[in-house]
Image (tube, helix red, strand yellow):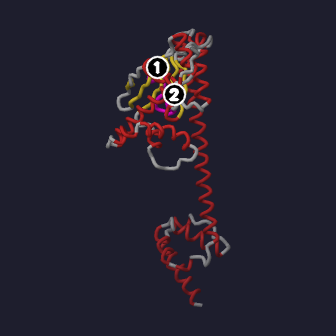
Amino acid sequence: MFRTRLIGSFLSTTTKQVSSSAIATIPPFPSRIGTASSWSVRYCSNHGSLGRAAATTPVFKPASTPLTQSTTRSASSSQQGQQDQDISMYLKETHERVFTRNRSWAAEQIAKDPDFFKKISAGQNPEYLWIGCSDSRIPAEQITGLQPGEAFVHRNIANLVCNTDLNAMSVIEYAVAHLQVKHIVVCGHYGCGGVKAAMTPKDLGILNPWLRNIRDVYRLHEKELDAIEDKDAQCDRLVELNVMEQCRNIIKTATLQKSYAQNKFPVVHGWVFDFRTGHLKDLNIDFEARLQDIQKIYNLVDN
C-alpha cells in the first residue's frame, strides 16, 4: 500500500514538472515493468527535471539488471561494429592511395622522358648494391638521388650480412657475379631500432638470434663501447661498428674475393645516414687494407 501511494505521489509531482512539449514527445509506455523501468531511466536522463526526479527516486530502478546489461552489450557491439567499419575504410583508402600515387608518378616520368619505361624494361645494369636497414625512413634511392635501375637493393633489420642468411648471400652472389656491380654499400643509420634492441637486456623472441649478431659486435668492441658514458653516443658508435663488421662479412665471401681478384671491383663501402641532418657519413673504410687483412684467414681465392 505504501509503495502504491509513493508511486502515485511521484507521478503526480513529476507530471506537473514536465512541459507539454516534453509530454508530447514521450513514446508509448512499454507494457512490461522491467522494460518500463529501463525506458524511464533512459528517457529521464535526457529530459530536464524529470531526469533529476528519476535520479533521486529508487522506485523506477529494476530489481535486477539483465536488460541493462543487454543494452550495454548492444551499445558495445554497435561501437565495435563502427570501429570495424572505420578500420575497413582506412585499409581501403590507404591501399588505393598507393595506386593513385603510382599513376601520378608514372605520368611524371613519361612527361620528363617519354621513353623512360621502355628503357628500364630493357633490363638493369646497376652500379651499386645497397644493403641497408628496413627502417621505412631511409629508402635508398631517395636519400642518394639514385634513379630506378641504378641500385640493386637489399634491406633487413639493422643492415646485417650473415653468412647463414641465404637471402643476403644470394643477393650478393647475383649482384656481383651476374649484375657486376662496382660498389657494395652497407648503410646503417643513427638511432637504429635494431641496435637499440640489441643493447636492451630483454627476451625478444624470434628476434633474439638475429640481434645476437649485433651483440657479438658489441662483444668484439666491448672495451671501446663501455668507455662511452652517454647512451645515445654509445648507440651511435655501435651503429658505426656494426656497419664496419658487416662490410668485413661481405669481404669474407668467395664471391667478392674472386670478383675483385679478376676485375678489381666491386669495392665495399660503409656509410651511416643521419636523420638529424639528412646527410650520409662515409666511414672511410680502407677496402684493400681490409681485404688483405681478412685474407690472412678467410682467403677463398685459388692461388
Residue most extreme to the right: 31
CA neighbours of label 2 inside 10 A, class few (<14), some (14 to 19), many (20+): some
Span shown in magenta: 132-143
Disc nearest the viewer among 2 and 1: 1
Q: Amino acid at mark 2?
A: Asn
Would you say residue 278 is visible in this rendering?
A: yes
Would you say residue 126 is visible in this rendering?
A: no
- Sequence-wise first label, 2 or 1: 2
Kindly identify which residue carries mark 1.
292
The residue at the point 50 percent across, 11 percent down is 264
Image position of 71 (left or right of 233): right
Closer-to-camera residue (165/219) = 219
Q: Position of residue 208 (x, y in %)?
A: 54, 44
User: Is residue 124 a member of the stretch shown in magenta?
Assistant: no
**SS type, badge 2:** helix
The residue at the point 55 percent across, 16 percent down is 149
Q: Position of residue 220 (x, y in %)?
A: 44, 37
Closer-to-camera residue (67/236) = 236
Quadrant in the picture for the N terminus: bottom right
Q: Amino acid at mark 1?
A: Gln
Kindly identify which residue carries mark 2.
249
Q: Is residue 60 above or below residue 301?
A: below
**SS type, badge 1:** helix
Q: Is residue 258 above or below residue 240?
A: above
CA neighbours of label 1 inside 10 A, class few (<14), some (14 to 19), many (20+): few
Q: Could you give the CA–CA distance between mark 2 and mark 1, rounded to whole angstroms?
A: 14 Å
Quadrant in the picture for the C terminus: top right
The residue at the point 67 percent across, 74 percent down is 32
User: Is residue 138 a member of the stretch shown in magenta?
Assistant: yes
